[in-house]
Each structure stands twice: as C-alpha cells, then as structure tokens.
Image: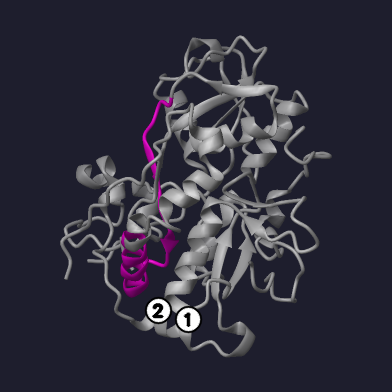
Amino acid sequence: MRMRGRVRTGLRGWGGVGAMAVVCGLVLAFALLLPVARSHGDGSTGTGGPGVTRADQVADDDPCTNPAIKAHPEEQTLSPSSADGPAIDKIKARQGEKRKLIVGVDQNSYRWGYRNPNGGPTADLEGFDIDLVHRIAKDILGDANAVQFKAIPTNQRIPAIQGGRVDMVVRTMTINCTRLGQVAFSAPYFKTGQQVLAPKSSGITGYNGTLAKQRICTAEGSTANTKLVDAKKAKELVSSAVISPPVPNQLDCLVRLQLGEVDAVVTDGALAASQAAQDPTVELKGSPFTTEYYGVAMRSDADDLVRRVNQILVDYRKDTTDGWQASYDRWLSATLNESSAKSEPPPPKYLRKN
C-alpha cells in the first residue's frame, strides 16, 4: 500500500542584511511564486549557470507508526536505476525554453544555495546543493544548465512538490518519517545534526540548561522547530526556554539574532556553520544533539525519478574529478572542517524493491 500522509501545518550577514521581512501567514503561499531573480513571468530564472517512497509493509498512513521507518528514515528509498519512466518522460517532453528541470532551492543559504553578490552581473546561484542540481540536470536532460530554479521558503518545500510546481526540491531538506508520508526522498547525500548558534559573548554553551530563559529561533516547517516543540512537551528542554514564533526562512533567524530579537538559533549544524561564516560575532555552541540526513525530495508517485536520482548519486559519489568530494571541498570544507559534519557522503541503503 502506498503511504499517504497528512501535511502538518503547523546580519550582519555575509554581504550585509538590511532588515528582516515580516511575512504574514496568509501570504506564505505567494512567496512560493516569487522568482529567485530575473523573472520570466513564471517564477523562473532561466538557466542557472514515488515513492519512499513506498512502504508496502506499513498498514497505516503514518510512517512514523513503524519503528523501523522512524528509526532509519534515510533508508526508505528505492534502489538505483537509469531507466526512464512516466516522471522523467514528462520532464523530457517539455519543449523549447521550457525543456528544463524545475527545482526548488534556497537562495539565502551561504555555500549551499545562495546568490553571490560579488558574482558579477549575472550573480548565478552557487553552492553545494546547486552543484548537485546541475549534475542531475546533466544526466536527465544532457545539459547541466537546463534548470529552472525556484526560490522556496523552508515551510513551502513540501507544498511545492505536492502541488507540482517543481520536479524536486534540493534545499538542505532532512529526511524524516513524517515527510516520508508526504513526499519521496532519494538516498541521503549529506549527514548533519541539530546545533545551537549564538553570539560568541553569550553564556549559552549548547543544547542544555544554559538555554533557560533564552529566546530560541527556528524556521517554520523545519526539523529544528519540530524537535524543540516536542522536547518542550516531553520536558526534555529546559522549561523556561522560549521557543519564538517560527520564521519562513532559516536566514531570518540569523537576522533576528543580529537584531537582538532572539538569543539563539537552532538549526542543522551544516547550515549553522555557514551562518557563523557569514557573521564572525556568532558561533556554534556545543555538539549536535540529533543525527539527520539531507535528501532530494520528489513526488510520492515519481518512482522512476527517485530511482534515477539515486543512480546519479551513486555516480556522483564515485566521481573523483567533479563529484561529491570536489563540491564539498569547493563550498563546505572551509566552514565545516572544525564541525561535526562528515567530509564524506553517507553510505546509501535501499528498500528491497525491484
């Protein structure tokens, strides 16, 4: 039986940040339609430089009721294949300028998916996630630049996939059991964990009692927000810690921290390290307190696309010239070499599916 889930509702930075935008919940859906830049009228930027998918053994529509899936969501993906199928055929059938892979990405995560303000007049998107997108486009369409990027807030990643606005999302998206009931994931391409980010002058030392009476920022729809809310209910988080109302995008938390509106940020350590590189007055505090894996997210019925991306990841890991390691060295090694993030791709495991 195919799983069906219910969508859960609920700087001084590098290059400089003026102020944090205040976004009303009623217009969050509109944010999805905003282009990354240079709009062509369809939310695109032009050329930039399923199933988990299925779990036949689950009799409930919530994969989190299955202990094996809850414990190892990163293993709930389909085996690799280079064969085309309905989802890939649909992508290849696009004509002319529209014959592109449509991908939801971030444009504000330094060294993951961001627009370099010093990149010249085109200021193309750059980063570790962007390299992977180009690799996928090259394999499927024969052209690494055959990509239509769409900027998506953290809390709109799943709706963008389910609504068919994008073919996939490559945006530091953690694989977890709840999301497995909503979208399909590839095998993991990066391992990280939740960490605390705070000013260097702060008395906060990590995810511990020093968070007492501290205001903590997270992004809406993020695993960090879910973790803190659940930890507060389970009394695993110091009771006087204040979970601030979540923001649409992760970078908004750094802005709020800089404005003194919050005292700490909780996010993936890989993202926190990049934010610390943007602002030398902040740093990671303590060790990661979760283990998480990033995956490429796709529609739950796009089995052929999931398998194809998994095959691309197999080849990407093996490529010693322009593959995973080269991208890591280019974008992440400078900010992650002293953190807990691994400098090698996590080994994939697949469901036993033909």
Q: Amino acid at mark 1?
A: Ile
Give me the C-alpha separation between circle 1 and circle 2: 7 Å
* Crowd around label 2: few <14 · some 14–19 · many ≥20 (10 Å): some
Which quadrant would the N terminus be assigned to in this image? bottom left
Residue 99, placed above or below residue 234:
below
Q: Residue furthest front?
A: 321
- How many marks are shown on the rendered structure? 2
- 293 inside magenta stretch: yes
- 217 inside magenta stretch: no
Which quadrant would the C terminus be assigned to in this image? bottom left
Element at badge 2?
helix
Q: Position of residue 74 (x, y in %)?
A: 31, 48
Q: How is the image coloured?
A: one colour
What span is colored magenta in the figure? 288-314
> Going 61% across and 9% down the picture, which residue do you hit?
203
Q: Which mark is residue 314?
A: none
Q: Quadrant of residue 100?
A: bottom right
Q: Position of residue 307 (x, y in %)?
A: 31, 68
Element at badge 1?
helix
Q: Amino acid at mark 2?
A: Ala
Lateral position of residue 118 relative to residue 343, left or right: right
Residue 85, placed above or below residue 174:
below
Residue 259, placed above or below residue 148:
above
> Going 40% across and 59% down the picture, which residue do you hit?
182
> Going 34% across and 70% down the picture, which residue do you hit?
308
The residue indicated by pointer 2 is: 87
Q: Position of residue 65 (x, y in %)?
A: 25, 46
Q: Position of residue 312 (x, y in %)?
A: 36, 65
Lateral position of residue 96 relative to residue 326, left or right: right
The residue indicated by pointer 1 is: 91
State if disc 2 and disc 1 touch (CB < 8 Å).
yes
Lateral position of residue 150 relative to residue 172, left or right: right
